[in-house]
Amino acid sequence: MKKEKINLDNIKQDFNIIIKEQLAPAREWRFYNIVLMALLSILVGMLFQKIWISLLIFLPAVYHIVRYLIVYRNYRVDKKAIRNVSSREDISISIQRFSHMGQETIYEPHFGRYAHFTKRVTFYYFSTGTQWRRYDVHKHYSWSKEYYISSKGLEYISVAGDEFYYIELQGHPDVAYIYPCKSFELDDSLKE
């Protein structure tokens, strides 16, 4: 089986996918709340013709606007950090032995069939205690010519005892990605 090389541009592309997936639930959920509160405040304002009642109803939307701006600022900081990655020193690379996969229920606003605030998320656990959250992206390793796979495909090829490259952005522990050692190898510029 031929191994494909991972270079810095591939890692940056995968990191960008991760941070977009982290932003998506906050963006959708907060946007709908802001629009709903704005429409409700306009309707009530027109009905009662009192601006203070309209502003009072719009007040919860201000909270969602501020929270979204905080999340978006963090997204911009992560995106800038990814863009500034220029060498091996900007990322942390380790080889982890895959232990097992599990699902956890976490608090995360999202939309789906029902707008619940808890979500079942798949985590990959490694023997060192490291865990990686698998995001349900359309294709993992989309830059790869041979090994681009779906989230379920990644689950099917992950066998206990397999080794993975665990690559993390320095100073940003939520921005990490895994690469199976049986399918990928590090480019010469990434080796120590």
Image: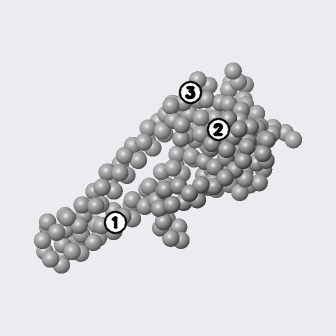
First in sequence: mark 1 vs mark 2: 1
Residue at x 67%, y 44% (from the top left corner): 125
- The quadrant of the image that shows the N terminus is top right
Task: Assess disc 1: are there few (<14), some (14-19) or many (≥20) residues with their C-alpha within 10 Å of its C-alpha.
Answer: few
- SS class, disc 1: helix
Q: Residue furthest right?
A: 1
Question: Alpha-carbon distance for marks 1 and 2?
Answer: 42 Å
| Residue occupied by mark 3 | 90
- SS class, disc 2: loop
Q: Inspect the image, locate mark 1, and give the three-letter code of the amino acid beneath it.
A: Val
Task: Assess disc 3: are there few (<14), some (14-19) or many (≥20) residues with their C-alpha within 10 Å of its C-alpha.
Answer: some
Inspect this view and state whether residue 17 appears. yes
Q: Residue 18 appears at what percent x and percent y? A: 56, 46
- The quadrant of the image that shows the C terminus is top right
| Residue occupied by mark 1 | 35
Q: Tell whether 189 sits left or right of 64.
A: right
Q: Residue 154 appears at what percent x and percent y? A: 72, 51
Q: Inspect the image, locate mark 2, and give the three-letter code of the amino acid beneath it.
A: Gly
| Residue occupied by mark 2 | 129
